[in-house]
Amino acid sequence: MDSYLAEQSSQTYEREISKISKAINNAETFEEWIQLAKQAKDYHYKYRINIDELISLISIKVRPGLYKNSISDQKDQILLNLQNLLELQKLEIPVGEIKNVIIEYALRWIEDVNDVKKIKAFKGETVVQDPDTSREILKIINQLEIAEEKTQEKLKKLNELFPVPTEPVPNQPVYITQRSQIIMGPPIFVRSELNVNQCKIMWKGKQIAAVIKTYKEQGGYKSLKKFQKEVGILHKLSGTSRFFLDFYGCFCDEVIENNVIKYCSNIVMEYCQHSLSDLIKSRKDQNTKFTPEELGSIALDLLEAFQSLVNHKIYHQDIKPDNILITKDGQWKIADFNVSGIRETIERTYSATGVHDVIGTVGYMAPELRKAYINGEGKAKYRPERADVFSLGLVLYQCETFDDISRFNENPINREKVLSNVRLPWLRELLYDMLNFNYRERLSFKRALSKVMRDTTATLDSNAT
Ligand SMILES: Nc1ncnc2c1ncn2[C@@H]1O[C@H](COP(=O)(O)OP(=O)(O)OP(=O)(O)O)[C@@H](O)[C@H]1O
Ligand SMILES: [Mg+2]
């Protein structure tokens, strides 16, 4: 949580933006553009440039040049372009229209070379099929997010013709599949249906600190569902952003407790030394408030972290300081996905009504959820992302004031309390909008992030002059 704010003046990063914009504008090939986009992403971490705007703006201008020089019918170039797309997707760098063009070319190559439409056969031309390269191409395309229905249909047909053997090849090696692979350590968290323990795992000849989260038999089918959801999400997110935990594997087994066999579902993941909850508590005990720079850094990082989650179409639904962890290097990690919502599932089940299950921790729930919860209703009408924004607003409020927030979400009048207790004008304004009791008027993470970027930069500028 070092203060980048104090380090960088707006002049430095304006210079950097203009330098990189110019370079991206002059890029002549897709490869060159990618290198520069990656550099821009680094700047984004370093100087907090809003990369989405920067890149989408620039990619429109350079599109014709990039098409001309990089799109080709050659299979090596096709494979290279696809691998590049995959890398950009992992880095969350938007590439715009060029992505569709590359995929379209690749699918057309498979159709042509294998004479899928039987045109060459009809003309009596010889066909030399290339199923191996076709599979190689499909394997990459299957990992890319594709929005266009037409492309998805074409892809589905080609996948049927050239089935790619499914193998578990995640970003991280998943290698923990049984208890004998771990060395158990002390408990961190114990509840009747859930344990979290420290542990060690062997990796490339070294012992790595990890945790094992065990859903116990007592939790019944509900626990199993939670386990399944958490594994799916941790696996999907692992290695895709600095805000997500490394996933090391999962397994089911049994342990003997008091001569009784208990069935357990276990997840092994990266260990974090502290949580935001520990940090707030220790600061409160020492009576040391977070400095304005620290608060700026916390707000920016956490908004970016939850925006990354939304980019993966996942809503956390239980945001609170206990579920925001910190590694020993001071990196924030989002934890505890067992009640999270996945957009595709939500859309399949509830999209027409906008009504969802009431979940989360009552003190941190958005008001529209709390009300339903207090009335004993299992469902409520709400927008999952906006509910998360409210919960994060409460977390940020707590970082600033150390106040008990448990009844804050009961009454809109309480919002005024936030305004009077918050010292920093930019945070006061941000919380005013994040803690709006009307979810239709509440900010999204994206808008909250742009607001903080703009406002903290303005504060810096005025401090500098
Ligand atoms: N990767 C981790 N590294 C360190 N501690 C962890 C990790 N994962 C979980 N913990 C600790 O275990 C606690 C419980 O884990 P988690 O929040 O995932 O379970 P949970 O059942 O969903 O808990 P709750 O319902 O209380 O939120 C966390 O609050 C945290 O203190
Ligand atoms: Mg938790």
Image: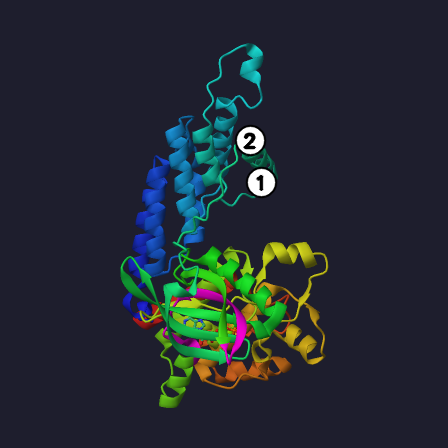
Q: Give the residue pinned by disc 2.
A: 161
Ligand 1 near label 1 (Cβ, under 8 Å)? Answer: no
**Kind of residue sitting beneath label 2:** Leu
Residue in the foreground of this view, choosing between 435 and 158: 158
**Can you tell which mark lies on residue 37?**
none
At mark 2, the secondary structure is: helix
Frontmost of labels 1 and 2 is 2
On the picture, is 66 further left or further right than 153?
A: left
Q: Nearer the viewer, residue 307 or 79?
A: 79
Q: Quadrant of residue 298?
A: bottom left
- Amino acid type assigned to the residue bearing label 1 in the image: Glu
Upstream in the sequence, badge 1 or badge 2? 1
The residue shown at (56%, 77%) is: 364
Q: Quadrant of residue 84?
A: top left
Q: Quadrant of residue 222?
A: bottom right
Residue beneath disc 1: 148
* Element on which disc 1 rests: loop
- Camera-nearest residue between 252 and 256: 256
Quadrant for the C terminus in the image? bottom left
Q: x, y percentage for residue 201?
A: 35, 65
The chief SS type of the magenta part is strand
Q: Residue at x 41, y 58 (%)?
A: 241
Looking at the picture, does residue 436 appear above or below residue 236? below
Mark 1 Cα-neighbour bin, 10 Å: few <14, some 14–19, many ≥20: few
Q: Is residue 457 magenta?
A: no
User: Magenta span covers which residues?
Assistant: 257-277
Tell me if I can see residue 423 in this picture: no
Left or right of residue 192: residue 77? left
Residue 269 placement (x, y as % from top left): 41, 65
Q: Residue furthest top?
A: 124
Q: Horizontal and vertical percent for residue 91?
A: 40, 51
